[in-house]
Amino acid sequence: MEAVRKVFRDNLDSAYAEGMSYGMIGYCVPHSVYPAGYHCDPKQPLPYAGMASQKNHMSLYLMCVYGNDGDNDLYRWFTAAWKKTGKKLDMGKACVRFKKVDDLALDVIAELLRKTPAKAYIAHYEAAIQNNAANAAKRKAARAKAKAPVKKKLAAKARKK
């Protein structure tokens, strides 16, 4: 993991801070840069990345590639660049799992870190939050619209009785 930390330290924007978060080594946008903090817990700084050693594997959590099931341009770039290396990518939405450091495309990770300075990551994060809020409002409106005919039918039945 020390090799991965070195990649982070050598390529990460100086606005990020390294520390322990969620029981692992983490990198975040501190409150001095982004006072709003993490929307789930504003007392916490905005998480950017983390690395952890699990029982059967190690993990990198790369929040900048998280999102929208491939609608994220950075996610598409990351997965395509990784594929070009010939290394297997074992990835969830933002979690890259690996058994040994040699399994990682460290050059792709380094480039990803350079591509996401704190300002760009904050913009991506805020856009995702707004997009999620807009989608939630659309889902709520659709549910209300779907329930309206049912309510009318129930009201009509009640009047007939």
Image (cartoon, rainbow, N blue to C red):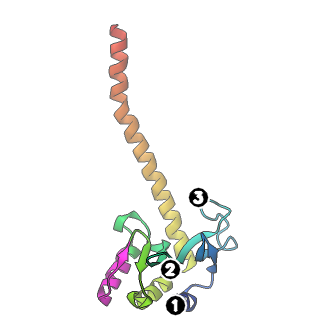
Q: SS of the residue at dot 2?
A: loop
Q: Tell me the kind of residue under disc 1.
A: Val
Q: Tell me the kind of residue under disc 3.
A: Cys
Check the image and name the residue furthest to the top.
161
Q: Which residues are magenta?
A: 76-91
Q: Tell me the kind of residue under disc 2.
A: Thr
- Indicate whether 156 appears above or below 92: above
**What secondary structure do most residues of the magenta stretch adopt?**
helix
**Residue at 32 percent of width and 9 percent of height:** 160
Q: Tell whether position 56 is magenta.
A: no
Check the image and name the residue furthest to the right.
32
Q: Which mark is residue 116?
A: 2
Q: SS of the residue at dot 1?
A: helix
Residue 104: x %, y % from top left: 41, 87
Residue 25: x %, y % from top left: 59, 78
**Residue at 58 percent of width and 58 percent of height:** 40
The label nearer to you, 2 versus 3, is 3
Residue under pointer 3: 40
Quadrant of the snapshot with the C terminus: top left
Q: Which mark is residue 7?
A: 1
